[in-house]
Each structure stands twice: as C-alpha cells, then as structure tokens.
Amino acid sequence: MPVSQPSLDIVAIGDAIVDVIATCDDAFLVEHALPKGQMQLLDTDHANRLYAAMGNARETSGGSAANSMAGIAAMGGKAAFIGQIAKDQLGEIFRHDMRALGVQFDTPALNSGSEHPTGRCLILVTPDAQRTMNTCPGASHQLKAEALDEALIASASILMLEGYLWGPELPRKAMYRAIEIARAAGRKVAFTLSESVCLEGRSEVFAKMIEDGGIDLLFANDHEAMQLAAAPSLGEALAVLAEKVPTLVITRGAEGALGLQDGVGVEIPAIPVAEIVDTTGAGDLFAAGFLTAHCRGHDLRKCLETGAIAAAEIISHFGARPEADLKALVQL
C-alpha cells in the first residue's frame, strides 16, 4: 500500500535532449549516409558536422519521456521529469522549455564542459513525413543514481522509464534505484520500449526485470514487441509478454493500437489526419494520452483512444510538442 497519497500523476526518467528539426530531401540523407526513418547514435564531432550541414532548423527540448511529460502537462496532468543536462546553452533551453510547459524539472546541471554537452537529436524530415533521427546523448547518459530526487519519485502515482536510457550503465543503475523507490512507496512502474532495449546484451537484462515483475505497464510498437519476445508474429509476442506484464500497450502506426490488460484485449483504429506532416513524437504523445487517462481512472479503451487523439495532433505539424489545445481535444 502507498505510504501516502500521490501528489503527482507521473514522474519520468529519460534522455534530456534538445531536438533540432529541419527538412531535407532524400538526396541529403544519401549524401550523409543517414538511414532513412531510423535512429542512430552520433559522437560529438559527427553531430557537429551534421549540424553544420543542415538547413534552417528549429530547436526545442525533446527526448522521448520528456515529450510524454510535456503532453501530460498539456492535458492538465501533474508531471515531473528527471534527466541530466550540462551547464551550457542547450541545457538552459531544455530547462526553460520544460518549466514553461508546466513540467517540474529540477535535476542539477552537470558541470562537464565540452566532454559531455547537453544531448541533442538532429531530426531530418523528408517530404513523405518520415523522420531520420541522429542522436548525440552527451550529458543525458551521465545520469547517476545520486542525482535522483527520491522524494519526487515517491510522490508520483506512476514512475515512467525511457528505453533509450537502458543501455548505458550509469542511467540504468539510476533506473533500478528509481524502481526500488517507487515500489517502496507502492507506486506503479511504466516502461516505454525502444529498439535499443532489444539489442543483444540489453534485452536479456530487461527480460529478467519484467520476468521478476518489475514493470506494470509496457509501451512498445509492434516491431519492438516481437523483438523483445523473440517471436515471429505479434500475436505470439503478446502471448509471451502478457504473462509477465499486467498492462501492454502496442502502437501500430496507421493501423491503430491495441492494449492487453489482465487478459482482456482492446483494439482501436488510428485517428484520421488530413495531412501527416511529421511523425516525430507520435509514440511519445500516445503514451502521454494513455497515462493521463489512466491516472483519471478511465478504462483501457478510453486510455487507448486518448492516446490516439494526442498522437494524431502531434503528427499534423512539425515537432514533438503539442500546438493545439490537447486538454480540449481529449476531454478528460
């Protein structure tokens, strides 16, 4: 049982990244050997070269879990974020953006100089709305357990963890510690998967964690679910994962989404969009909508539908932060 009533809906731990978004054609991707529609990690020097070659860009605070917290705040939820930034210009942009959006963010900046600058994701959007992400994690992968605000974690109804931070040793240890804190306070733990979690050497450790009952709610797309479960079909993957995780949420792009909760399955279609401009952050905002509705006590179908509404709004414009009044759109 919780030691006290939660004062926050959700606290997330994830990459503190500044998104740098620009448009380009397919020829630019070929010229710079960038895998279209995929995400790759860059070191600082490579990121600097690519940034210099990009056209006009827009800079906003980003990162998967941070995007979700921004969405939750936009829907009227109480959200907080824990992530590592550096003492530099991009770090100040990130902190200002998060607080301006209504997300509590107080993680102290890392005084790392040029060795570990604030992380950035160079996002190139082609005319077909596909986004190619090139991430330089920088300071975000230096998050230590000692930087966690334990009282903040214990105060939230749900602890949300981001898969992109699962690989590096320091933030993975921090996430383990955060789970201990949340469990001691009687809170739920949600995890948003990423393809990086499914890589060899990472999936085994994560699989053991869900085997041990460490995750209450798992977000994944269909491909990630199949990779994690080592299953040839989505149906078989769901059968494997549903035995270990009480609530599964699977996004399927244009095919909609489905959820499994305590053996009960619900499937919904995607929300029609007049024009898909940029798919950046679609999964992040889906999770935001789902979690906001979940914290309001809604059933699985309503949670999925709320996620779909939030995702549809985000793909109708550039960037991973809502521009329309999400609170009015989801009507919770």
Image: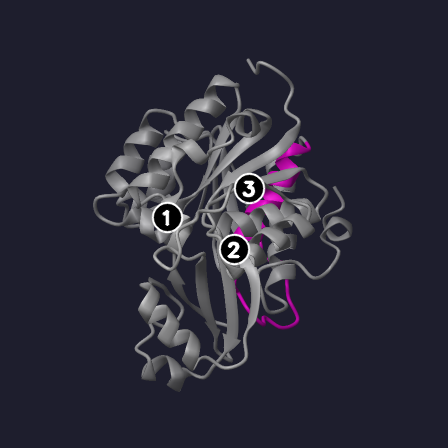
* Residue depicted at x 38% and y 72%: 48
Q: Mark 2, mark 3: which one is toward the viewer? A: 2
Q: Earlier in the sequence, mark 2 or mark 1?
A: 2
Q: Quadrant of the N terminus?
A: top right
As helix, strand or loop, the secondary structure at mark 3 comes to strand
Observer-nearest of 38 and 241? 38
Q: Which residue is mark 3?
A: 81
Task: Kindly identify which numbered label has been placed on residue 91.
Answer: 2
In front of the other: 37 or 41: 41
Q: Residue at x 32, y 69 (%)?
A: 45
Name the residue at 42% across, 23% down. 180
On the image, the x and y values in percent for residue 106 come to 57, 40
Residue position marked by numbered label 1 in the rendering: 141
Asked if residue 271 lies left or right of residue 64, the reply is right
Q: Residue at x 51, y 68 (%)?
A: 20
Q: Amino acid at mark 2?
A: Gly
- Residue closest to the eye, 250 or 151: 151
**2 or 1: mark nearer the eye:** 2
Which residues are the magenta region?
A: 268-296
